[in-house]
Image (cartoon, coloured by chain):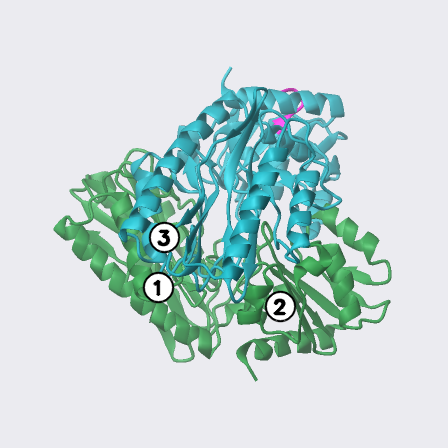
Chain colours: A green, B cyan
């Protein structure tokens, strides 16, 4: 049984227990859901329907792409349904022979006005749209990486680490002088090494722009790694999965800058030391908030997040009362404490962590580089 | 009055006519809405609230960024609301002094489960969530570019055209040999010329991969512009606004490939000849479908789309019965007929068109390049 079929079986089991007759997954512009790729191999732009009698129907925007990559029992071009989700869901209920009166689940990101359209068009069915349904289940399953995914991450991390080493070398030698030099180096080298590309737009911020959490524009022709704090945040996408690391380059720091950087490193070490199977991610993030708070500083973003087919996935790693995630074997996630100041600039240190039965493994080798 | 205040005034007028007391715009991960930037200057990741008594409140994720770019009467960090939309909307109703009992409009992309949360949390108000509300109005207004935006597009197109010329020269001379060569050339040159970067991931597909509408991965180390059909689809982002063009490179075509290309060029010419103030975009797309249909071919995507702060904006340019867009002065949009075949590869020709009172202006100079 192939990897995608294997994953679908888990959703079928869940559907049987919950009595849901058909589930619709949607990965389209504005409503991205990598669960479609995870369950069918189709890289993007498709609907996927699963039925309680364990059949799947893939409805791709690009049928040529689906012939190459798509794995499902039935494949029908989205053109057959005029690229309209309402027509497709009715077509799928027919194609998968769902008897009327039963439960059909649509994605929880379905906009309210579109939800009303679904309910109006599917009067024969009980339409479900909820946070804790099939889609939440798929997201939870995706948070626990399987052996194929862990193998992909080991390769992706290896390439990421070799590029980190080259970046350090080229910044030290003066070969990389600007933000664009750094970002374009990553674009070129990642593809040479077999990556699909970068997982998100590389953020390269020299000392004048590192005050922002996410530099805007993402990178420019401005000087990089000069006097002060520079941030380089990037991820490599390999076989669909993205790494996510942040380096800080530090040169001739003022006492205030040194303080930001030392605190960030201290927070990173503390957070990493708290990672273990069974640990509450909220408590780790809370410990970091306390360290920063003692110095009257605050981190304006979450401590970390799961990674995978998406740049940000489960588990959440933040100090908020709606976060009840607990770390488990199979999770791959970032830890990325950072501090930002409009006058002094900012710094962040981010690595990707894998938890296994055997313990904690820091997959990537991002670091603070003092020049 | 600044450009953002000017734009807000148009929404305030609409709110007064419709009796809507407060409107919430949201631009966050998974729910992007460039209307926030259009109305406030804040580049991304923020909520924006407008009140019927013509006051605005910006709630940015990154307060340092908002101090530089944000334009609003009140600016409050999203941290004050624990980065939760429900807390922020209650805070905004308080900050903007909205009396209970009145209408508050939330984005039409609000997921159904979140909509229920809003209704539960805002029992004092009448919560609206609809396609044809304030957000639809902002989108319609954004489809008609103002003088500032047209000036930006003239610059963006000029840079795009100079890069098209360089691409042609470098492919002909053999300096650009691979998909990655082409894409990285665009990344580097666009930034050198003052662009923010590319408007979307460049799609460079050599003859072996041009069968796909959107190549996957977007570009690789594979050969580009060899025997057959190669597609290069890219856009440059300048001051936030993106161009969107597609070149086809053709070399030693088979009769079947020649047929695809000739038909595409014919469709492009026909579509362009039909562009005029008052023309229905559906009828233009229908005419292209007829041309392709006569040769028993079909285009698997829309004929075009508006461009702006987003890669895909209004107006829609497609042959579907829910499309009633009519072309007007101020619109900037693409025309991009294309045909794709799993055996022969694919081709597409795409340019950006500006309509003014004076007539039709083809801003960009993308073309079929026969090698």
Start-end of magenta stretch: B50-55
Task: Provide residue B99's location: percent of width, then percent of height.
Answer: 71, 26
Q: Quadrant of the N terminus of chain A?
A: bottom right
Q: Residues within 10 Å of mark 1 (few under 14, many from 20)?
A: some
Q: For this rendering, which residue is in front, A174 or B325?
A: B325
The residue that disc 3 covers is A337
Please indicate whether residue B6 sits to the left or right of residue B172 in the image: right
B74 w.r.t. A141: above or below: above
Q: Which residue is mark 1?
A: A272
What main secondary structure does the magenta stretch of the protein show?
A: loop
Question: Based on the displayed image, in which of its 4 quarters is residue A352 positioned?
Answer: bottom left
Which of these two is toward me, A332 or B235?
Answer: B235
Residue at 80% x, 73% y: name it. Answer: A97
Disc on the earlier residue, 3 or 2: 2
- Reading the chain from its start, which is encountered first: label 2 or label 1? 2
Q: Secondary structure at mark 2?
A: helix
Q: Residue furthest front?
A: B255
Whether residue A316 is visible here, answered yes or no, is no
Position above or below: A1 against B134: below
Q: In x, y percent, where is residue B152?
A: 44, 28
Give the number of the mark in front: 3 or 2.
Answer: 2
**What chain is tagged by disc 3?**
A
Name the N-terminal-most of marks 3 and 1.
1
Residue A341 lies in the magenta stretch:
no
**B227, A300: nearer the viewer:** B227
Give the class, few, some or many, for how many residues have Cα within 10 Å of label 2's Cα (few <14, many ≥20): some
Quadrant position of residue A216:
top left
Q: CA distance from mark 3 to mark 2?
A: 29 Å
| Residue A368 placement: quadrant | bottom left
């Amino acid at each position: 049984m192939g990897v995608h079929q294997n994953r679908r079986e888990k959703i079928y089991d869940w559907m049987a227990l919950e009595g849901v007759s058909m589930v619709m997954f949607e990965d389209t512009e504005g409503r991205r859901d990598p669960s479609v790729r995870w369950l069918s191999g189709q890289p993007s732009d498709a609907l996927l329907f699963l039925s309680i009698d364990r059949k799947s129907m893939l409805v791709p925007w690009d049928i040529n792409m689906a012939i190459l990559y798509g794995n499902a029992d039935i494949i029908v071009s989205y053109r057959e349904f005029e690229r309209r989700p309402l027509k497709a869901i009715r077509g799928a209920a027919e194609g998968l022979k769902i008897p009327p009166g039963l439960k059909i689940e649509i994605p929880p990101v379905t906009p309210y006005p579109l939800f009303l359209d679904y309910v109006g068009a599917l009067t024969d069915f009980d339409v479900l749209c909820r946070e804790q349904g099939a889609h939440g289940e798929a997201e939870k399953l995706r948070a626990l990486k399987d052996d194929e995914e862990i193998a992909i991450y080991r390769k992706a991390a290896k390439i990421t680490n070799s590029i980190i080493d080259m970046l350090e070398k080229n910044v030290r030698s003066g070969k990389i002088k600007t933000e664009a030099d750094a970002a374009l180096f990553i674009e070129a080298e990642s593809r040479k090494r077999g990556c699909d590309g970068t997982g998100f737009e590389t953020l390269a911020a020299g000392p004048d722009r590192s005050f922002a959490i996410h530099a805007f524009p993402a990178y420019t022709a401005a000087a990089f790694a000069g006097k002060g704090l520079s941030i380089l945040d990037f991820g490599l996408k390999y076989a669909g999965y993205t790494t996510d690391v942040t380096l800080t380059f530090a040169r001739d720091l003022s006492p205030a800058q040194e303080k930001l950087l030392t605190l960030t490193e201290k927070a990173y070490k503390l957070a990493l030391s708290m990672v273990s199977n069974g640990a509450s991610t909220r408590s780790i993030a809370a410990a970091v908030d306390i360290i920063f708070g003692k110095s009257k500083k605050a981190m304006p973003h979450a401590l970390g997040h799961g990674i995978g087919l998406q740049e940000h996935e489960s588990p959440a790693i933040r100090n908020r009362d709606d976060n009840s995630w607990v770390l488990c074997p199979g999770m791959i996630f970032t830890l990325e404490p950072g501090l930002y100041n409009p006058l002094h600039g900012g710094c962040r240190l981010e690595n990707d962590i894998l938890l296994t039965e055997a313990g904690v493994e820091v997959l990537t080798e991002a670091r603070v580089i003092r020049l």
